[in-house]
Amino acid sequence: MNQMATNFNKIIAKLPQLISILSKINSADIKYGLYAGSHVSILTSNRVPTDVDFLVADEDFIKLKKLFPFAKEKNYDDGKFLYIGEHDEIKCMSFGGLKIGNFRYFFRLSNLCWENTNLIEGDGFKVRVLNEVDTILSKAMLQRGKDLGKHDLEDIEAILQTQDIDKEYLKKRLLEVNPDERLIKVLKKFGLI
């Protein structure tokens, strides 16, 4: 088993319901991908997250809701969310964007994004993960620090220390996310563009 699968097993140990949830999602042919802190965790082995984030294709959100009829649905300016689990520990987002101040980034599972996901398989599970670029972009958009209990810029640095970044994909994906000077500045700081 590769290191990412081993690290995902640590998340499953904390959230064992993930196995059955992923089995349902995979069986329903829903386009999704793991991203955010849980993605950083399996890429870098830096920490075990307290929750799991999935980006879901907009066209599959209704299908996902039907699979989990008791999940909590919340709509915000930055997307539609479905919270699965007793303590909302599994968060699925569609129709997404990230609103920072008055600026809105687009963050959706587009066809380009889907084509660049990877499948990780381990003991009793299969999980789709977004390309590292997508988690880097979401972290560069948010730029939250320890004051909020987050590690966005540290997470970018950790990813860069352990992963080769597909800069061609980054260029293409940037065209989809509505980048601004603030986002570009962070990507330049890390030598990504």
Image: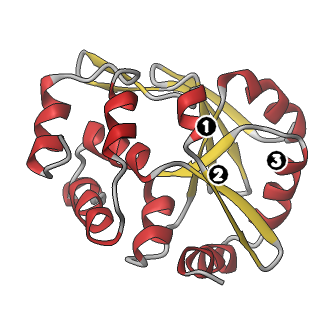
In the figure, 164 relative to 24: above or below? below
Q: Where is residue 124 in the image (x, y as percent from the top left)?
A: 83, 75
In this rendering, position of residue 150 left or right of residue 73: left
| Distance Cα–Cα, label 3 vs label 1 | 15 Å
Tag nearer the camera, 3 or 1: 1
Q: Which amino acid does label 1 sit on?
A: Trp
Q: Residue 88 carries which label?
A: 2
| Residue designated by label 1 | 114
Front in this rendered view, residue 190 or 97:
190
- Taking the spot 43% from the left edge, 78% from the top edge, the residue there is 45
| Distance Cα–Cα, label 2 vs label 1 | 25 Å
Instruction: For the C terminus, give its image quadrant.
Output: top left
Q: What SS does tag 1 mark?
A: helix
Quarter of the rendering containing residue 180: top left
Mark sitting earlier along the chain (3/2): 3
Q: Where is residue 157 in the image (x, y as percent from the top left)?
A: 22, 63
Number of numbered markers: 3
Q: Where is residue 13 in the image (x, y as percent from the top left)?
A: 68, 80
Q: Which mark is residue 25?
A: 3
- Taking the spot 48% from the left edge, 49% from the top edge, the residue there is 131
Front in this rendered view, residue 37 or 158:
158
